[in-house]
Amino acid sequence: MPTKEHLVFVTNNPNKIAEVARQLGEAYDFQSLADIGCTEEIPETTDTIPGNARQKAQFVHERYGVNCFSEDTGLEIDALDGAPGVDTAHYAGPERNAEANMKKVLKSLGRVPNRKARFRTVICLIRNGQEHLFEGICEGNIAGRIRGDQGFGYDPIFIPNGSSETFGQMGFTAKKVYSHRAKAVQKLIDFLQQ
Ligand code: IMP
């Protein structure tokens, strides 16, 4: 049997780990930050989503010398001029509270009819010292209210195009059909398998 390639996923978010682990499957020996004993707060201080993805991967690559990939995701709402964008995690404050973040989005939008939005994920892979970026986008709309209790983050207020349900009303398998993260991870897999 061929040896599995080791890759560290620069996150401790259990939801992201579950989504990505299912997709990467058995072909990779895939570890989280906890698995390599990294308990430090990883900086995310640039003003762009790709910038934050690169910053996180570079941090772990430099300190731990491992092949790794990070991902950074933002929600961009057209009627809010692209906000929360790079501020998605802490839109309602430094506590990074998902419910407060969703409520702030719903309040900021009010009854605005244009509810177009997208999730943008950028993955940064550092492998054998080389850096590679992969992007996945999911277009959709912001719901009028919080719907569903599955998933994480803004899932209960995001309706991907092609569905009448929010991500929060879907299980993993249905979310994967539309998901920004799944699209970026598929590009990563295609690259790794070249
Ligand atoms: P980060 O990429 O971990 O910095 O996440 C940015 C923000 O986007 C956090 O508030 C996450 O909860 C949220 N987020 C990331 N991915 C998703 C997703 O797939 N669905 C809903 N919210 C997400």
Image: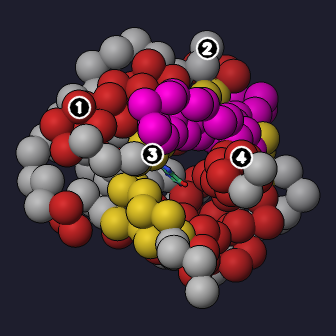
In front: 163, or 119? Answer: 119
In the rendered structure, which amino acid carries the disc numbered 2?
A: Asp
Secondary structure at numbered mark 4: helix
Residue 88 percent location from the top left of the image: 42, 34
Asked if residue 51 shows in the view, the reply is: yes
In the rendered structure, which amino acid carries the disc numbered 4?
A: Phe
Q: Name the residue under label 1.
A: 62
Image quarter in which the N terminus is found: bottom right
Residue pictured at 42% horizontal, 62% vertical: 6
Is residue 190 toward the left or the right of residue 16 in the image? Answer: right
Residue pictured at 71% horizontal, 67% vertical: 176
**Callout 1: few (<14), some (14-19), or many (20+) C-alpha neighbours within 10 Å?**
few
**What is the count of numbered marks?**
4
Disc number lying in front (1 or 2): 1
Q: Mark 2 points at which residue?
A: 81
Q: Marks 1 and 3, how far apart in space?
A: 13 Å
Q: Marks 4 and 1, how far apart in space?
A: 22 Å
Q: Name the residue under label 3.
A: 69
Q: Mark 4 points at which residue?
A: 191
